[in-house]
Image (cartoon, coloured by chain):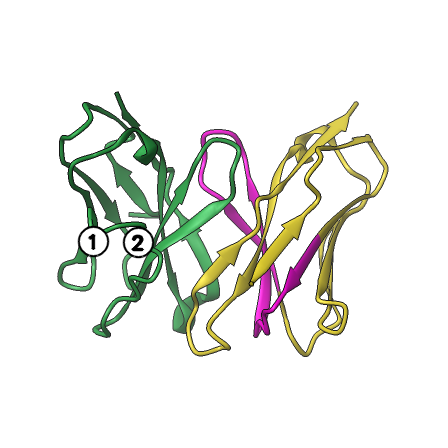
Chain colours: A yellow, B green
Amino acid sequence: SQKIEQNSEALNIQEGKTATLTCNYTNYSPAYLQWYRQDPGRGPVFLLLIRENEKEKRKERLKVTFDTTLKQSLFHITASQPADSATYLCALESGGGATNKLIFGTGTLLAVQP
Amino acid sequence: GAGVSQSPSNKVTEKGKDVELRCDPISGHTALYWYRQSLGQGLEFLIYFQGNSAPDKSGLPSDRFSAERTGGSVSTLTIQRTQQEDSAVYLCASSSYRLAGPEQYFGPGTRLTVT
């Protein structure tokens, strides 16, 4: 069956360190993968998209990697700040590139301690 | 408006009643999605509208759930004969591949509580 897994435990790190979040999937062949941030009581906010033919994508302190052989994406936040504390969701395009239908993981709660 | 809006923000209803949830997407966005998020869970896909194509209803959990999108803009999600397990936050998102790529823009959600 199709499955998307993210770090099930909350991730606690110290301010200034790099946070690394994992997204693993099975039985999908996504055309792209997206990462979203969700704060309590709010809808998710888009952060980054990486396509199947891209290995790495960066945006300011954020970096995403995508390994279609391992079926894994890693999401890094460098020089983390308490304001980065939130739940981070990965999402796979599930229509083989023909649609923009996304399937979301359950999210990882990141807590950055000052 | 500048973003996706949803109404109401909160809805408390009695078991067995029908509810309607509204979504106003970003102007010009051709795609509209409904998701459901239960406490501590990820987003569960419900339904997807793309332009004038037939909607993808594959995520609707039962025939008590339906949605329509009028004039290619506003959408209404209807839940008939609500059950306690329908309690969740219902999120709407829109996107436009042509304008902004495949990323989705979410509204703030409607928190539904069935008592």
Q: Is residue B87 above or below residue A66?
A: above
Closer to the N terminus: mark 2 or mark 1? 2
Mark 2 residue element: loop
Look at the image and tell me in which quarter the N terminus of chain A lies: bottom right
Name the residue at 35% across, 57% down. B59
Q: Nearer the viewer, residue A42 or A30?
A: A30
Q: Is residue A21 left or right of residue B91?
A: right
Do marks 2 and 1 share a chain? Answer: yes
Q: Which residues are magenta?
A: A23-49
Q: Is residue B91 above or below residue A39?
A: below
What subunit carries mark 1?
B
Q: Is residue B6 visible?
A: yes
Name the residue at 13% across, 59% down. B70
In this figure, which residue is indicated by the disc labeled 2?
A: B60
Q: Nearer the viewer, residue A79 or B68?
A: B68
**Magenta span includes A36:** yes
Q: Is residue B102 left or right of residue A27?
A: left
* Disc on res. B67: 1
Q: Nearer the viewer, residue B92 or B83?
A: B83
Task: Locate residue A59: give its quadrant.
Answer: bottom right
Q: Position of residue A76 (x, y in %)?
A: 76, 50
Q: Is residue A46 above or below residue A99?
A: above
**Residue at the front extreme, as displayed:** A1
Q: Are marks 2 and 1 in contact (CB under 8 Å)?
A: yes
**Magenta span includes A19:** no
Q: Residues within 10 Å of mark 2 (few under 14, many from 20)?
A: some
Q: Is residue B15 left or right of residue B109?
A: left
